Structure formats: structure tokens, C-alpha cells
Amino acid sequence: MIIKNKTVVNDDWYVLRLGENDTPETVQVPTGKIIVPLQVWQAQRDTLQARAQLGVWLGSAERAEDLQHDLGRFAVIAVDFPKFADGRGYSIAYHLRVRLGYQGELRAIGDVLRDQMFYMQRAGFDAFAPRADKDIHEALKGLSDFSVTYQASADEAQPLFRRVSRRGQP
């Protein structure tokens, strides 16, 4: 189960993670809806580009620019959060949405917790795979923790002071 567009849905995608003895060049990519690591996409691009149901995931140390010419090929782009305190994935998501114009599903995977999800949504994520040890329905509530945002972000281009009208001002 994942949260997608503020709804709990079944997840029919498989996230491929490299095993201890796997390399990006030699790992066997299963058929079906699969989200592969960026390194696997780069190493096996010639083979994988023919697949219609393909996603890619980026680690927190990887760059969104590495996908800028291939964005239209992916139904899903996921960003891995290796630990709660690692916020680099927010920048990756914002970059994909705002600067590179990615319009497909942008999913947060890894150490995804309720406390982060509202802010992840602001950065551009529209799908979330909360940690398996957490209640997904409780995590869903995290998307509506706040009703008003002050700053501009991927989900709202204008800061609050530009969105409100004040009496006596045009």
C-alpha cells in the first residue's frame, strides 16, 4: 500500500534494490512494473528503454539532472530517503517538478514518516511509501497537518502575502 494523490491505494510497482553481490550492469531486472535505481537505468538503458512500465529511483546523493533528457520515459520517479534526517530528497523533488518540469508520479520511498509528508508534498511529491512499521492511514493524516502555507514552493508558486487581499489595497 502507498499514498497517492492523498488516497491509500494498492501499490503494483516493485522497487528494485541492488543486493550485496549485484552490480548495475549485471543485475537481472524483473518484468512488470519496476522502479530501478538510477545506476541500473544508466548501465542498462539500451535494454530498458523499450519497457512501457518503467520507473527509476534516485538516491539522496544523486542528481535530478541525470534524468533531464529521459523524464518522459518514466511513469514513476522515486526519491529514496535513507534516513529521517537526510533532507536532500526535498531538493531533488523540487528540482524535478519546478526546474525540469516533470509531470508524472513523484514518489518518496525509504524512511518516510508522517512528520515529513506535508513538507514532501510541498516540494513536489504526490506519492508516498511510508515505512512498513508505520500505520499508513495515520501517515495519510500528515498531508493535512496544516491548512495554510506561508512560503512559495512546488505546490504553491505565490507566498501568502501575494495570495491575500488586504482592505484598502487594490
Image (tube, grey):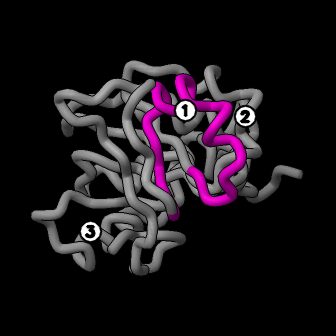
Side of 116 relative to 106 (left or right): left
Res. 41 mark? 1
Foreground label between 1 and 3: 1
* Depicted 96 relative to depicted 52: above or below: above
Q: Amino acid at mark 3?
A: Ala
State whether residue 108 is above or below residue 91: below
Residue annotated with mark 3: 139
For residue 166, the mark is none
The part of the image, by quadrant, that contains residue 5 is bottom right
Q: Is residue 158 left or right of residue 120?
A: right
Residue 132 at what x, y percent from top left?
Answer: 17, 63
Q: Position of residue 141 (x, y in %)?
A: 31, 73
Does 132 sit above or below residue 96? below
Task: Read off the residue under disc 2.
Answer: 70
Q: Are marks 2 and 1 in contact (CB under 8 Å)?
A: yes
Question: Type of residue at label 1?
Answer: Trp
Q: Helix, strand, or loop for circle 1?
A: helix
Q: Disc 1 versus disc 3: distance between alpha carbons?
A: 31 Å
Gap in angstroms between the C-alphas marked 2 and 1: 10 Å
In the rendered structure, the answer to whether residue 55 lies left or right of residue 24 reads right
Could you tell me which secondary element the residue under label 3 belongs to? Answer: helix
Q: Is residue 53 magenta?
A: yes
In the image, the segment drawn in magenta is: 32-54
Which residue is located at x 64 percent, y 21 percent?
65
